[in-house]
Image (cartoon, coloured by chain):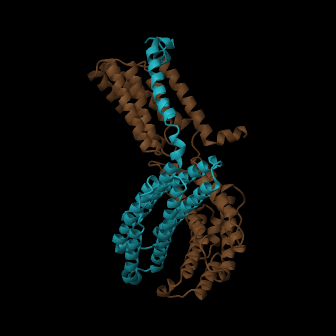
Chain colours: A cyan, B brown
C-alpha cells in the first residue's frame, strides 16, 4: 500500500497548484458580499418588521402544536412525542422574544416613542404566549380525554381562526392597508361556549376546566385585539 | 474552572472525545486506507458527533447518509463527464441544500445530515475518478471510520446521563425558587413593582432555551430504555410547572378587585411558601445535600384556600361567569392547586424513600 497520506490528497502541498479553484472561491464570496453591501441599507429598516413576523409565526406554530395535543386522539399514547414538539415551539417563541429584545437594545438611539412602542409590542406578544400556555393547561387538567371529542369541531374551528388571525397579523406587519379581523376568532369562541353550555357542562365530569379554557381563549382574543391596535400605531410612527 | 470541572462538563468531554477519535481515525487512515480519499477520518468525525441521547442509532444514521451520498456521487461521476458540469452540479446541489437548511432552521439534526451529504459529495467529486473498485474501497473506509467512532464513543469518557440531568434540573429548580419568591413578594405587597417577577421570568426563559441547560437529549429515539421513562416523566412535569408559572404571571397582571384578592392573599402566600419548601427539597436532592424532611402536611393549606374561595365566589358554574373577577380568582386558585400537585408528582418521582413514607395518603 502506498504511503501517500490523506493530507496530501485532500490538501494539495502547493495551494497555487489549484489557483483556479482559489479564484472561483474568491469570486463566489465576492458575489455574496456584493449583495450584502448593496442592500445593506434595507437591513436595519426591515429588521424590526422581520422580527415581528418571526415572533408571530412562532406564536402561530405554538398554537398549532397546542391545539394538536387537544385534537389528536393519540396524544395520551404519544405524550412524549407531542411534548417534545411543543417544547421546540416554545423555544422558538422565546428565541424570537430574545432576538426582539436584542434589537431593541441596539436601537437605544431611536426616538423614545418608537422604543416604548416596540417594548409594549414585545410585552403584548409575551402576554399572548402566556395565554397560549394557559390554554394548553387543558391537556393536563382533563382526566377523561374522550370529553374533547364532544367539542373537537369547535376546538378545530378556534384553531383555524387562530391561524387566520396570525396570518393576517403577519401581513399587517408588511402592509399598513392589511385589515385584521378578530371577529372570526370571537365567533368561534362563542360557538365553543355554546357547546359548553349545552353539552360539556352537563356531560363531562370536569366542566370547570372547559370554562377556564374558554375564559383564557376570550382573554387571548382581547389581548390579540390590543396587539392589532399596537401594530396600527407602529405603522403610524414608522416603527415597522 | 478547575480541571475536574472541565472533565465533568459534557461539552469538554465531548470535545476531547471527538478530538481523540479523529486522531485515531487519522492515523488508521494514513496507514490502512483503501481509497486514499480520507474517508476513514471523515466518517469518524461525522459519526462521533452523533447526539448524546442515542449515539449508536444516530451514528448508524450518519453512516447511512454517508453511504447514500457516496453512491450518489459515484453515479454522478459515472454519468457526467466534463469536470465543469460536475462543478456546476455541485454548486446547484449546494444551493439547494443551503436553502433547505435555512428554511428548516433551527432543526439542527437535518442540518447535520445535509452537511454530511454535501461533504461526502464534495470530497468525491473533487478527488475521485469513477471505478467500481474505488466505490468499494470508499465504502470499506467509511465503515472502518464509523466503527472507530462508535467504539471511541462507547469507551472514551462515557456519558453520565443521570449526573448531567441532575445538574440541569438543579439550575431549573433554582430558577423556580426565584420565580416563587417573586410571586410571594407580589402577593405580600401587590402595590410594589413587578421587576423581580420580570427578572425571574427572564432567568427561567434563558435556562429553558440554552441547549446546555435543558436536557433535550432524553427525548431522542433510542435513548437508554432503563432511564427513558423516568427522566422523560420528570422533564415533562417540569415543563408543565413552568407553564403554570407563566400562566400565573399573566393572571396577576390582570386587574382583580383588591378586596377580593386580599381575602385570598394569605392562604396563597402560605401555599406558595410550602411550594418553595418542596422546590428546596428538590434542590437539596440534586445538589447531593442532606434530605430535608418537611413538617408541612401539604394538604390542609390547599383545602383552606379552596374553602376561602368558595366563600367568595358562587359555587354554581352558571353563576361563576357572572363576574370576570370570580373567574380570575377561580383560575388563580386552580393554578396554585396545580403547582402543588405537580411539585408533589416531582418529589414522589425522586428516588428518596423518607419523603414517600411521610406523604399523607390523601395526596
Across and down, in percent, residue B311 comes to 60, 88
Instruction: Compare residues B57 and A165 and report the one nearer the observer.
Output: A165
Instruction: Compare residues B2 and B209 and report the one nearer the observer.
Output: B209
**Number of marks in picture:** 0
Q: Is residue B214 visible?
A: no
The answer to whether residue B99 is above or below residue B20 is below
Position of the N terminus of chain B, as image quadrant, is top right
Determine whether B69 is above or below B11 in the image: above
Viewer-closest of B60 and B89: B89
Percent x, y of residue B89: 34, 27
Residue at the (37%, 78%) spot, across then down: A195
In percent of the image, x 45 and y 31: which residue is there? B146
Residue that protrudes farthest toward the front in the picture: A236
Q: Position of residue B228 (x, y in %)?
A: 50, 54
B87 relative to B23 in the view: left or right: left
Q: Does any portion of residue A1 appear in the rendered image? A: yes
x, y percentage for residue A6? 47, 18
Question: Where is A196 relative to B52, above or below?
Answer: below
Residue situated in front as seen by the camera: A181 or B150: A181
Looking at the rendering, which quadrant does residue B133 occupy?
top left
Amino acid at each position: 500500500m502506498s504511503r501517500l497520506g490523506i493530507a496530501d490528497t485532500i490538501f494539495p502541498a502547493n495551494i497555487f497548484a489549484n489557483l483556479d479553484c482559489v479564484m472561483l472561491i474568491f469570486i463566489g464570496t465576492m458575489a455574496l458580499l456584493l449583495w450584502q453591501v448593496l442592500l445593506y441599507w434595507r437591513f436595519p429598516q426591515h429588521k424590526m418588521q422581520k422580527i415581528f413576523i418571526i415572533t408571530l409565526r412562532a406564536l402561530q406554530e405554538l398554537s398549532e402544536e397546542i391545539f394538536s395535543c387537544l385534537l389528536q386522539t393519540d396524544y395520551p399514547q404519544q405524550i412524549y412525542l407531542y411534548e417534545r414538539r411543543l417544547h421546540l415551539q416554545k423555544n422558538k417563541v422565546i428565541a424570537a422574544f430574545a432576538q426582539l429584545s436584542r434589537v431593541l437594545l441596539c436601537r437605544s438611539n431611536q426616538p423614545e416613542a418608537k422604543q416604548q412602542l416596540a417594548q409594549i409590542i414585545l410585552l403584548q406578544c409575551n402576554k399572548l404566549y402566556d395565554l397560549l400556555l394557559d390554554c394548553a393547561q387543558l391537556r393536563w387538567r382533563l382526566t377523561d380525554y374522550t370529553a374533547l371529542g364532544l367539542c373537537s369541531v369547535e376546538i378545530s374551528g378556534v384553531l383555524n381562526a387562530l391561524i387566520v388571525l396570525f396570518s393576517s397579523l403577519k401581513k399587517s406587519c408588511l402592509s399598513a392597508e392589511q385589515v385584521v379581523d378578530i371577529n372570526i376568532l370571537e365567533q368561534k369562541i362563542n360557538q365553543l361556549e355554546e357547546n359548553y353550555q349545552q353539552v360539556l357542562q352537563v356531560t363531562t365530569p370536569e366542566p370547570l376546566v372547559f370554562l377556564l379554557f374558554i375564559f383564557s381563549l376570550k382573554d387571548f382574543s382581547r389581548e390579540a385585539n390590543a396587539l392589532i391596535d399596537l401594530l396600527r400605531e407602529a405603522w403610524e410612527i414608522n416603527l415597522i | 474552572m478547575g480541571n475536574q470541572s472541565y472533565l465533568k462538563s459534557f461539552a469538554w468531554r465531548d470535545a476531547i472525545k471527538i478530538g481523540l477519535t479523529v486522531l485515531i481515525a487519522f492515523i488508521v487512515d494514513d496507514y490502512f486506507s483503501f481509497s486514499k480519499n480520507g474517508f476513514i477520518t471523515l466518517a469518524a468525525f461525522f459519526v462521533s458527533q452523533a447526539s448524546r441521547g442515542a449515539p449508536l442509532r444516530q451514528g448508524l444514521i450518519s453512516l447511512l447518509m454517508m453511504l447514500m451520498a457516496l453512491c450518489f456521487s459515484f453515479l454522478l461521476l459515472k454519468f457526467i463527464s466534463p469536470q465543469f458540469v460536475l462543478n456546476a452540479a455541485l454548486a446547484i446541489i449546494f444551493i439547494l441544500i443551503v436553502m433547505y437548511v435555512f428554511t428548516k432552521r433551527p432543526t439542527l439534526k437535518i442540518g447535520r445530515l445535509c452537511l454530511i451529504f454535501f461533504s461526502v459529495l464534495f470530497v468525491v467529486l473533487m478527488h475521485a475518478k469513477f471505478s467500481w473498485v474505488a466505490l468499494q474501497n470508499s465504502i470499506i473506509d467509511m465503515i472502518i471510520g464509523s466503527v472507530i467512532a462508535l467504539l471511541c464513543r462507547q469507551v472514551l469518557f462515557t456519558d453520565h446521563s443521570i449526573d448531567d440531568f441532575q445538574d440541569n434540573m438543579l439550575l431549573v429548580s433554582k430558577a423556580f425558587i426565584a420565580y416563587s419568591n417573586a410571586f410571594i413578594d407580589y402577593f405580600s405587597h401587590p402595590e410594589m413593582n413587578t421587576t423581580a417577577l420580570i427578572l425571574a421570568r427572564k432567568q427561567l426563559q434563558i435556562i429553558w432555551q440554552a441547549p446546555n441547560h435543558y436536557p433535550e437529549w432524553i427525548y431522542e429515539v433510542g435513548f437508554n430504555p432503563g432511564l427513558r421513562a423516568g427522566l422523560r416523566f420528570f422533564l415533562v412535569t417540569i415543563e408543565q410547572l413552568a407553564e403554570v408559572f407563566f400562566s400565573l404571571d399573566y393572571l396577576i397582571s390582570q386587574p382583580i378587585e383588591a378586596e377580593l384578592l386580599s381575602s385570598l392573599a394569605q392562604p396563597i402566600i402560605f401555599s406558595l411558601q410550602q411550594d418553595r419548601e418542596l422546590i428546596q427539597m428538590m434542590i437539596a436532592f440534586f445538589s447531593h445535600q442532606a434530605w430535608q424532611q418537611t413538617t408541612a402536611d401539604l394538604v390542609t393549606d390547599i383545602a383552606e384556600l379552596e374553602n376561602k374561595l368558595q366563600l367568595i365566589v358562587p359555587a354554581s358554574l352558571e353563576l361563576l361567569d357572572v363576574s370576570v373577577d370570580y373567574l380570575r380568582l377561580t383560575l388563580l386558585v386552580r393554578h396554585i392547586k396545580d403547582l402543588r400537585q405537580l411539585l408533589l408528582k416531582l418529589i414522589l418521582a425522586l428516588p428518596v424513600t423518607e419523603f414517600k413514607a411521610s406523604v399523607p395518603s390523601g395526596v
